[in-house]
């Protein structure tokens, strides 16, 4: 009767899965919807293809591995590459890796040790050197 749109946007602040501050996950983590990380994930964090999804790394959150989602919000620590259509780096963001994006927002105070890579289609982008903006190590934005 009703056809569900797989790419429907998630509501602002929507949290379907919460990784609490005392939680440590080792291994790849696949999700749909809103993922909010206050704890630690050691492994890849990957949104299901074609689904609306947002991963948010809270101020206390740490991800050691690659992150792939349509929307990526970072206010904690990421050690690895981020791939997102829209990427936001908030004031407490600490990224040690490359950020692949279509649209990026970097707020004063965020730091990136790696490269900004603008890509036409981020989901299918493989690491390459096209459209790369080098960032010198330990550069503070703001």
Image (cartoon, grey):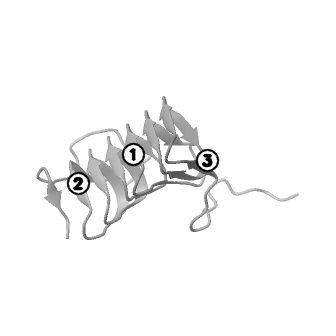
Q: Is residue 37 left or right of residue 65?
A: right
Q: Between 2 and 42, which is closer to the camera in this rendering? A: 42
* Dots 1, 3 in contact, CB < 8 A: no
Q: Residues within 10 Å of mark 2 (few under 14, many from 20)?
A: many
Identify the residue position indicated by label 1 in the image: 62
Image coordinates of residue 37 in percent, x first then y, are 49, 50
Image coordinates of residue 60 in percent, x first then y, are 41, 53
Q: Between 122 and 90, which is closer to the camera in this rendering? A: 90
At mark 1, the secondary structure is strand
**Label 3, label 2: how far apart the Cα atoms are:** 27 Å
Residue at horizontal 21%, vertical 43%? 129
Identify the residue position indicated by label 2 in the image: 112
Q: Between 31 and 8, which is closer to the camera in this rendering? A: 31
Q: Which of marks 3 and 2 is in front?
A: 2
At mark 3, the secondary structure is loop
Q: Going from the N terminus, do you reach mark 1 or mark 3 first? A: 3
At mark 2, the secondary structure is strand
Q: Which of marks 1 and 3 is in front?
A: 1
Residue 131 can be seen in this image = no
Identify the residue position indicated by label 3 in the image: 32
Q: Is residue 94 above or below residue 90?
A: above
Q: Going from the N terminus, do you reach mark 1 or mark 2 first? A: 1
Image coordinates of residue 42 in percent, x first then y, are 42, 34
Image coordinates of residue 47 in percent, x first then y, are 54, 44
């Amino acid at each position: 009767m009703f056809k569900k749109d797989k790419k429907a946007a998630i509501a602002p602040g929507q949290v379907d899965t919460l990784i609490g501050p005392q939680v440590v996950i080792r291994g790849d983590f696949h999700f749909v919807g809103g993922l909010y990380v206050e704890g630690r994930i050691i492994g890849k964090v990957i949104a299901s293809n074609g689904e609306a999804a947002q991963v948010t790394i809270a101020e206390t959150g740490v991800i050691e591995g690659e992150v792939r989602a349509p929307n990526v919000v970072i206010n904690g620590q990421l050690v690895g590459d981020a791939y997102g259509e829209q990427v936001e780096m908030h004031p407490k963001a600490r990224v040690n890796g490359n950020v692949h994006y279509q649209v990026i927002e970097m707020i004063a105070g965020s730091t990136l040790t790696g490269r900004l890579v603008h890509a036409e289609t981020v989901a299918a982008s493989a690491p390459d050197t096209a459209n790369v903006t080098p960032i010198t190590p330990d550069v503070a934005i703001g």
